[in-house]
Image (tube, rainbow, N blue to C red):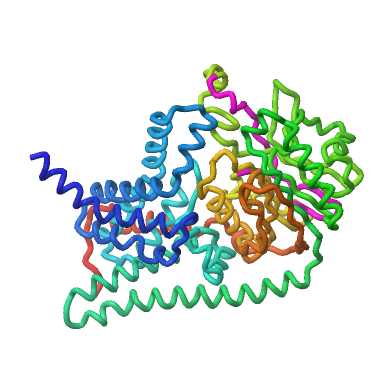
Amino acid sequence: MRLPRLRALAQALALPTLSGVLYFLSWVGYGVWPLAFICFLPLLWSLRDATPKQALGLGAWMGFVTHLGGYPWIIHMLQAFAFLPLPIALAIYLLFCAAQGLLFGVMSYLLRRATLATGLRMYALLPLALCATEWAYPLIFQSYTGVSLVAVLPLLQIAELGGPMLLSALQALVNGGLYDSFTESLHGPGAWKRSLAPTSAVFLALSAASAFGSYALIRQQAREKAAVTRKTGIAQPNVGEVELHKNPQASVRTLWEQNAELHARGAELVVWPEVGFNLHAVNVDLKQMGASISGKVPVSLVAGVARGEPPRKIWNSAVMISPDGLLGDHYDKIKLLAFGEYIPFGDMFPILYQWSPMAQPLSRGTTTAPLHDGKWLLAASICYEDILPWAVRETMRDRGEGRPHVLVNLTNDSWYGAGHEQEQHLMLAAVRSVEHRRWLVRATSTGTSAFVDSMGRVVQRIEPGVRAVAVRPVPMLEGNTFYQTAGDWPGYGSAAVLALIALQWLGWGRKRPRPA
């Protein structure tokens, strides 16, 4: 009896497995983006006769496979910095994939419930179920389905209107429309009439997104051309976390040399990576400390430092240093990284920090106020805060002196090894540039450091694993976007529509015939 059951289970999971593989191949890191428009088709076919409970399991399996292929660098992080043996690191990774992958289980459950309740087609319901779930489901590492379209520049521009969830909605609509067209084609004579609506929806959605994107690209190029520019430099010392702990001066001496090189090349503003200055904790009340941090190079500098008075409180911070060597504003990291900047339950069991010497308990920041560089405002983020749309949106808020003119990010990605995490992180962050129509200046310890323009294009990068600097004119842009004002409306709007569907049909259980 066991063998037939296993065979039946394998057959049931074959299509969700295929969807999971197509999904992670289409996503950032692998980047085969055309697969984004068909990755949900196998899953949708597997759901056609499923109960909501079965849909939950099928979708969760697809999500598990998706994350299994998309995040293998987590195993390296757990081994290198939490000092976990491979079996334990692998077990935690599998739990992580299951927990994050459950997002697609919830999506499939909602989708099947809504289908049974309304009889509506997939091109209408899949975007609702996906966006509502991406908005509400908690994730350890935030990601969005639609980021797979970051390579398609005209389509990427709609992030100005609705952030990454609007990209997810577009991708889901195309998948749903293609599925509807295919299933209608199986119904014999007159199929073309029934497939007209989903086919038209796909065509109109892609056409509208492309038309808006083409217009937005032309408009934004004109804005950048008219803006004042500042010659801005980024420094990548190529000193990873392990080397930094062994020799704190390794990063600082290199950054002083790179600061001098960037100044010689005309840089007015320089951005260092996360905690590039690691000699001692910085006291921001001692304004004269700025000169010792910058190496007495007369440029405006955003330096990554450890701030505070150990061992009581330490913050992972970005500090502003003026050309005359004085400390100015500071920004403290708010979203801390597990196993690097804190250990879960470490407050309750301090011995955990003795078992994981690479981790240290840091304090969370409390303000998202910008850094002042003369008359210019810089919206700062540290490490993976730049992949959190809501966090960057908060830093871009107008506090009565206008919105920040540029985004700066200080990162140390050496935690994750030499896999494709660096590219994933960069491309996820690039969407913030489109959402707010600002350049992103991103300095990392070991790569990938980059300049991203206000259209989401990586216009210059320093590849991982090299010690180098880069400098270029960066437009100081102004203005607001619809996304900055309305936020994640595709998410909360979709959740509201699904709630109305549930109320209108007096619960999910009543099946309604499809409208003629």
Residue 383 percent location from the top left of the image: 62, 43
* 60 versus 452 height, above or below: above
* 291 versus 344 height, above or below: below
Residue at left offset 72%, top offset 64%: 479
- Residue 43 shows up from this direction: yes
- Residue 506 shows up from this direction: no
Q: Which residues fall within the magenta stretch?
A: 355-383
Which residue is nearer to you in this view: 244 or 208?
A: 244
* 367 versus 51 height, above or below: above
Residue 286 percent location from the top left of the image: 86, 31
Q: Tell whether 286 sits left or right of 502.
A: right
Residue 379 percent location from the top left of the image: 71, 51
Q: Tell whether 244 sits left or right of 97.
A: right
Name the quadrant of the C terminus: bottom left
Name the quadrant of the N terminus: top left
Residue at left offset 41%, top offset 77%: 203
Residue at left offset 32%, top offset 58%: 504
Which residue is nearer to you in this view: 4 or 375?
A: 4
Q: Is residue 380 magenta?
A: yes
Residue 507 percent location from the top left of the image: 28, 52
Q: Tell whether 158 sits left or right of 508.
A: right
